[in-house]
Amino acid sequence: MNKFKSNPFYMKVFGDYTLFTDPMTKGGGEKFTYQVPSYQALKGIVEACYWKPIFYYVIDSVKA
């Protein structure tokens, strides 16, 4: 299968009250939050901004 490669784009994501949690820690007991968003959270942010059904998003790197 021949895949097309597009030019990369960059986003700056920030917030004073962000909370990135692991679904495994939501069950009960003490909750845990991450300083850096997970891959799935970043993919969700990009899809929310640039959603198109024919696009496939790949997160290459994260700079904190």
Image (tube, helix red, strand yellow):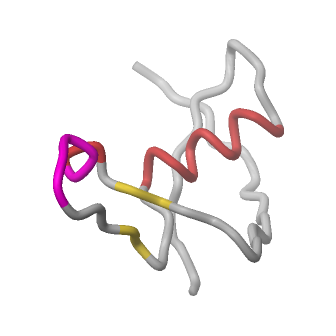
The x and y percentages for residue 23 are 29, 43
Compared to residue 12, the image places residue 46 above or below, namely above
Foreground pick, 48 / 30: 30
Tell me the residue at 77%/65% (across/down): 10
The x and y percentages for residue 27 are 19, 41
Query: Quick check: 13 left or right of 22?
Result: right
User: Is 16 colored magenta in this rendering?
Assistant: no
In the rendered image, the residue lying farthest to the top is: 53
Tell me the residue at 45%/45% (across/down): 40
Query: Quick check: 63 left or right of 36?
Result: right
Tell me the residue at 53%/54% (across/down): 59
Report which quarter residue 21 is drawn in.
bottom left
The x and y percentages for residue 14 are 75, 72
Foreground pick, 24 / 10: 24
User: Is 26 colored magenta in this rendering?
Assistant: yes
Report which quarter residue 31 is drawn in.
bottom left
Tell me which segment is drawn in magenta: 25-29
Q: Main secondary structure of the magenta part?
A: loop
Q: What number of labels is visible?
A: 0
* The N terminus, quarter of image: top left
Foreground pick, 40 / 33: 33
Compared to residue 30, the image places residue 36 above or below, namely below
* The C terminus, quarter of image: bottom right
Tell me the residue at 60%/39% (across/down): 44
In the rendered image, the residue lying farthest to the front is: 29
